[in-house]
């Protein structure tokens, strides 16, 4: 069975004879399963919404996924599932390249080189490492420590202008910019484009459903803390029903009431309504009414994504072909940047 990618969507034709030079967007996502509403609202949805404006490269970062233990079969399956899910969410291969990080060996090679130029003090400041490593620093792999350097390489290899991500990647992006600037200055050559983050004001930090002081996360041991993109309507209803709120009854945005405000923020992103409109809709109503409306919005948003995902997953040959073709088309960019880097250093 062969699946047409994004059937029915209109091909944009350019009437200007000289096509405009588009700025490059790069972003990545780990194939660690449990892709959730935070990933969707904080990143994926924005990639899709703006894909026609940029020259887009999206990467499934399997080399990052092995910085913590992961079953081989699970990693392999998750990688294909992630590709299908991103296409199902609306990434269109006419505007985007979507490839698997380990298919382009320049990522790993540049990562070694850039590690040699990264002060340990800079990595010691990375808060995600501290959270992920926990207290057992003797047994955690050094890959986890160097994770932000590999992420910097992903971005810098493609001379990226913009990096659309959620708020949790802010510190990694700052490190990327610092590393690029330092390297360019050290060798008095503009080897790397200095990238800018694109972090939205709303949606960049979707919080956990059971503890709204923590961000929604793939690795939270409690599955009720997140809505995954593949959750059934029943699971969504249960999770939203159990989501932590408070003893007040007002359906209003209030930073002091993190639970209800997080749910309202999700509703706002899904409906596109303003805070005032939402508060007016639920004036005089309680949390039960609001949660029912939110559940409906979520089910209706995820239904077409899940339908398309199932269609795409039934054609693995198409998925593998698309991933391979994308890697082939962007690899020359990575190879060129790495060669320039090696030349200025004097390698080879
Ligand atoms: P990852 O796989 O954890 O998450 C993918 C994207 O989802 C965003 N995100 C969130 N946004 C809002 N609320 C949340 N609760 C939430 N949780 C996750 C993340 O910010 C991210 O944009 N290190 C990256 C992957 C990566 C990358 C890169 C990203 C590797 N190389 C180069 C950009 C550029 C990560 O672990 O994302």
Image (cartoon, rainbow, N blue to C red):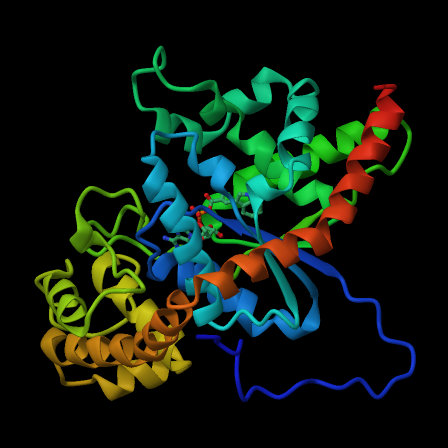
Of residues 170 and 93, the one nearer the viewer is: 93
Residue 80 picture location, percent across and down = 43, 54
Q: Is residue 204 at all visible to an observer of this figure?
A: no
- Which residue of the protein is positioned furthest toward the front in this rendering? 1
Q: Is residue 284 at all visible to an observer of this figure?
A: yes
Residue 120 picture location, percent across and down = 58, 16
Quadrant position of residue 306: bottom left
Decide if residue 142 is on the left or right side of residue 156. Answer: left
* Quadrant location, the C terminus: top right
Residue located at (63% from left, 37% from top): 152
- Up the image or down, 283 lies above or below 312; here it is below
* Quadrant location, the N terminus: bottom left
Residue 167 picture location, percent across and down = 47, 50
Decide if residue 317 is on the left or right side of residue 263. Answer: right
Residue 322 picture location, percent across and down = 58, 62
Of residues 55 and 162, the one nearer the viewer is: 55
Quadrant position of residue 85: bottom left
- Up the image or down, 213 lies above or below 20; here it is above
Residue located at (78% from left, 34% from top): 338
């Amino acid at each position: 069975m062969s699946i047409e990618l994004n059937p029915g969507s209109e091909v944009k034709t350019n009437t200007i004879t000289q096509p405009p030079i588009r700025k490059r967007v790069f972003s990545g996502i780990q194939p660690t399963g449990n892709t959730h509403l935070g990933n969707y609202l904080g990143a994926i949805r924005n990639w899709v919404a703006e894909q026609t404006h940029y020259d887009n490269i999206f990467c499934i970062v399997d080399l990052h996924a092995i910085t913590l233990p992961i079953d081989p079969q699970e990693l392999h399956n998750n990688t294909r599932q992630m590709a299908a899910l991103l296409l199902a969410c609306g990434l269109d291969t006419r505007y985007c390249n979507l490839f698997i990080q380990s298919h382009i060996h320049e990522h790993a090679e540049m990562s070694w080189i850039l590690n040699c130029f990264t002060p340990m003090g800079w990595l010691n400041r990375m808060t995600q490492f501290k959270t992920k490593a926990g207290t057992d620093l003797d047994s955690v792999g050094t890959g986890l420590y160097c994770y932000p350097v590999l992420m910097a390489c992903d971005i810098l290899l493609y001379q990226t202008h913009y990096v659309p991500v959620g708020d949790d990647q802010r510190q990694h992006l700052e490190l990327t910019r610092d590393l690029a600037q330092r390297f360019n200055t050290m060798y008095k050559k503009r080897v790397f484009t200095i990238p800018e983050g694109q972090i939205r004001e709303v949606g960049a930090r979707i919080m956990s459903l059971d503890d709204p002081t923590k961000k929604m996360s793939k690795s939270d041991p409690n599955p009720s803390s997140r809505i995954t993109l593949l959750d059934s309507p029943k699971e969504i209803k249960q999770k939203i029903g159990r989501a932590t709120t408070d003893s007040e009854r007002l359906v209003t945005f209030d930073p002091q009431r993190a639970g209800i405000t997080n749910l309202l923020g999700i509703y706002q992103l899904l409906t596109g309504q303003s805070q005032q409109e939402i508060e007016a809709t639920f004036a005089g109503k309680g949390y039960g009414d609001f949660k029912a409306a939110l559940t409906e919005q979520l089910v209706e948003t995820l239904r077409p994504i899940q339908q398309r995902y199932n269609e795409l997953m039934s054609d693995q040959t198409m998925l593998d072909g698309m991933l391979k073709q994308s890697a082939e088309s962007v690899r020359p960019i990575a190879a060129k940047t790495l060669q320039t880097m090696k030349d200025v250093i004097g390698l080879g």
